[in-house]
Image (spheres, helix red, strand yellow):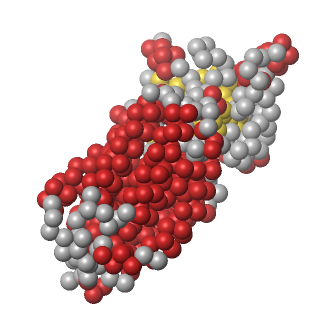
Amino acid sequence: MFNIAPDHAIGLYFGLLALPLALIAIRLRPARHLVPGTVLAASVLMAMSGAIHLGLIGTHREETITALLFLFNGVAYILLSVAFTWRWWRPASAGLLVATLLGYLGYIALGFDSPDQVAVATKLLELTALGLVLVPVRGESRRRTRRWASLGVALPALTLITASTVWIVDLARPADAQHAHAGALLQATNEVATPEQNSAAARLYAETKAAILKYQDPKVAYAAGYRPGGPSNMPSSHWMNQRYVDAGYVMDPHRPQGLVYANTKHGPVLLGAMFQMKRIGQFGPDPGGPLTAWHQHENICVTPVGLEFSLMTPFATCPLGAIDVSVPPMLHVWIVDNPGGPFAVDIDEGVVKSIDRA
Amino acid sequence: MIAHSESSRPEAVFVLLLLQSMLWTVAGLSAIPFALAGEVFMLGLGLASLLVALATCLLAIGVLWRRRRARRWVIAVEITSLVGSLILLLLPIGANHGPVALMTNLALPIAVILLLRKQREAFS
């Protein structure tokens, strides 16, 4: 949902192009003095949304129903953005906006499309337009109570429904296999490991395990410069060695940038090592192909206090005080039996719990 | 249709602030699953976000009622939010630069500030 689908990018250009054109078109119409500014603003936003929908027809010609829906939506939005003096403009616009919003959410929930930045941006435009269509202004006396009630219910409810649907769909069905892990982008690799890649992965595992076994004693790790990060009440913690991070060693089994420990009642228990690159977007060497794919955590909200994290919302916001960051690519090597494999993105929670119980 | 002599900018700002309040609500709610998983600070930030959402909603009502103090507060809050967002965008920390982030963190506060900028006489 934080990417722009290649076949949707054109919609964004159409929408941006429509903004100045819609503003000029409104300035050329004397009828603009007959309606409130909120109506004019809603017209501009609907023209932008209409242009985005029309722009997407070209890249969706193969999908006839989708292309027809884009055509209907685009034309209807453009017509309504022009007809702002029409007697039934408000109910027609509000109806179209609500139907489009809910229709899109149904569309992605049924798996016909995946949410991306162009879609979420369009939904934001439509939500704003809906608010501007419904809000009564001073001097208007018709149906004020009904419009206030509609605005008070529709805008908050539709915003929450849109955010939650987009988020659930994205987590349940990532747009591509590289985003299979929430908040993490996997390195692109071949699909099935070759025999050479299998042996290279086994070699990396053996070398790393042998090199870090000494850190089973956390005091040795501490003496080597590893420091725990994040809250200690979590099942596991990453201990980072800032010297190795700054030095930028690349996948050196003897100098991994981080170690991962389970926080058990008996004290820290070593789970594995973590190699980390220096720069965002710079994936490391991948000797094991799909077995040793690096991953990069993207769009995570980090608290400056306590180093805790959450995921950024579909509307690109974080809780107050949390900062949106992406972390350079990393590769874990788990020295305990992990159901996901020795190089999995995460350690299985059950494994950590069983170590804690042991 | 009615000819409009009075500006409807406060109503437009009300809608934008209501939307912004909902964005804070979503951000606050998003912290709760992580807080339940043991991240105690996230609970605090989530609750703080929900309080900001409430405050934004109250400020929106103040602007709608054309209260001068509400206008001043909104401009101050939006400038602060805009500066914070710009810093995050400029720092090399991998913050999201997508169109949605630009709309919610830059375009929305700028629109609110521009709409309220020349409206001092409309507020009492």
Picture coordinates of residue A41, whole percent (x, y)? 39, 67
- Where is the C terminus of chain B found, in terms of image quarters? bottom left
Using the image as rendered, state which of residue B56 and residue B121 is in the foreground: B121
Residue A205, horizontal then vertical, whole percent: 75, 20
Q: Residue at x 53, y 25 (%)?
A: A262
Q: Which is more toward the observer, A345 or A48?
A: A48
Q: Quadrant of residue B62?
A: bottom left
Label total for image? 0
> Which quadrant would residue A26 be assigned to in this image?
bottom left
Residue A289: horizontal and vertical position, in percent? 77, 24
In the rendered image, residue B114, in percent from the top left (x then y), is placed at 42, 76
Closer-to-camera residue (A94/A183): A94
Tell me if I can see residue B44 in this picture: no
Horizontal side of residue A189 vs A37, given as left or right:
right
Using the rendered image of the protein, determine whether residue A103 is visible from the camera's viewpoint.
yes
For the point 35% across and 34% down, the residue is: B36
B23, above or below A213, in the image: below
User: Compared with residue A54, is residue A255 higher up or lower down, i.e. above or below?
Assistant: above
Q: Nearer the viewer, residue A99 or A342?
A: A99
Tell me: residue A214, above or below residue A328. Answer: above
Q: Residue at image x 49%, y 64%?
A: B106
Q: Residue at x 71, y 28 (%)?
A: A293
Horizontal side of residue B112 vs A275, given as left or right: left
Could you tell whether B17 is left or right of A57 in the image? left
Check the image and name the residue furthest to the right: A196
Residue farthest bottom in this picture: B121
The quarter of the rendered structure image containing the N terminus of chain B is: bottom left
Q: Is residue A87 above or below residue A310?
A: below
